[in-house]
Image: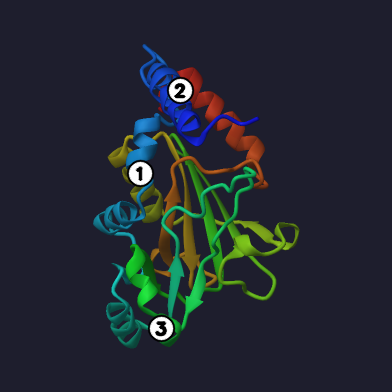
């Protein structure tokens, strides 16, 4: 029999502050990344603000719970998309769901928008996506093309995605390293929308950065593992 919900919550909180408190404050440890840095960098509005400050192109963005503001935003900058800030929490059975990025018809929205904050953005016309993983000062980038040109490549069959190495423009590389420094991160998984086949900085639009992202599914995962090992053995990056 499962313990009452209040007892479960108490046990989880005690573990977070007990074990978590120890793991967050290890003397002389190399963190990739430190939990506090991950927390700071996990807010999408902060990510977008930092990217813009560093000269990266970002989509026009609205954070609101006012349906009329959404309609006004769509009239000025449509078509628009919706994406969640954090996603859906696990259900009682522990299974994790996801909300994919989706196009929005503002006329279908109603006053239920007022329940919480939402993230709306101008849709970026794109030919492909790019996943750029930065580990220390090493940059690994893959162009990702999905069959049918899905708005969110994560929503389809990952086995059918086409991965191709892509050269990250110098100004983009420099901005991403500065981004990690600003948040106190050692590595991050960056997502970009690519609006052309060439590799000019102006064709790259910053979407987000996962400061604790997955990378083992990428074709160059082996080289990434070596980069992580180098960072840990060196204690920092060179």
SS under mark 3: helix
Compare residues 164 and 25 and report the one nearer the observer: 25
Q: Is residue 232 visible?
A: yes
Residue 61 sits in quarter: bottom left
* Location of residue 5 in the rendering, given as x and y in whole percent from the top left corner: 50, 36
Q: Which mark is residue 41?
A: 1
Q: Nearer the N terminus, badge 2 or badge 1?
A: 2
Farthest right residue?
A: 159
* Location of residue 176 in the rendering, given as x and y in whole percent from the top left corner: 38, 48
Identify the residue shown where x is 28% and y is 41%. 182
* Disc 2/disc 1 C-alpha distance (Å): 23 Å
Residue to which mark 3 is pinned: 106
Residue 197 sits in quarter: bottom right
Compare residues 20 and 216 and report the one nearer the observer: 20
Farthest top residue?
A: 27
Q: Which mark is residue 149?
A: none
* Location of residue 64 in the rendering, given as x and y in whole percent from the top left corner: 29, 68
Please give left or right for residue 109 compared with residue 146 in the image.
left
* Screen quadrant of the C terminus: top left
Compare residues 220 and 11 and report the one nearer the observer: 11
Q: Is residue 58 visible?
A: no
Count of numbered circles in the view: 3
SS under mark 1: loop
């Amino acid at each position: 029999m499962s313990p009452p919900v209040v007892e479960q919550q108490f046990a989880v909180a005690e573990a977070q502050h007990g074990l978590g408190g120890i793991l967050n404050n290890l003397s002389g440890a190399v963190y990739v990344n430190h939990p506090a840095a991950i927390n700071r960098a996990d807010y999408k509005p902060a990510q977008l603000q930092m990217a813009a400050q560093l000269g990266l192109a970002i989509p026009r963005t609205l954070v609101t719970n006012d349906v009329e503001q959404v309609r006004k935003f769509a009239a000025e900058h449509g078509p628009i998309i919706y994406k969640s800030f954090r996603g859906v929490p696990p259900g009682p059975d522990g299974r994790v769901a996801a909300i994919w990025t989706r196009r929005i018809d503002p006329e279908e929205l109603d006053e239920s928008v007022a329940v919480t904050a939402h993230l709306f953005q101008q849709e970026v016309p794109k030919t492909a996506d790019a996943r750029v993983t930065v580990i220390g000062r090493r940059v690994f980038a893959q162009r990702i093309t999905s069959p049918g040109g899905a708005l969110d490549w994560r929503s389809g069959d990952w086995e059918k995605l086409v991965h191709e190495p892509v050269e990250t423009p110098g100004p983009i590389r420099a901005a991403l390293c500065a981004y990690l420094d600003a948040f106190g991160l050692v590595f991050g998984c960056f997502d970009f929308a690519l609006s052309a086949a060439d590799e000019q900085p102006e064709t790259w639009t910053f979407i987000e950065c996962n400061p604790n992202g997955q990378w083992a599914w990428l074709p160059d995962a082996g080289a990434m593992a070596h980069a992580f090992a180098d960072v840990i053995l060196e204690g920092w990056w060179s």
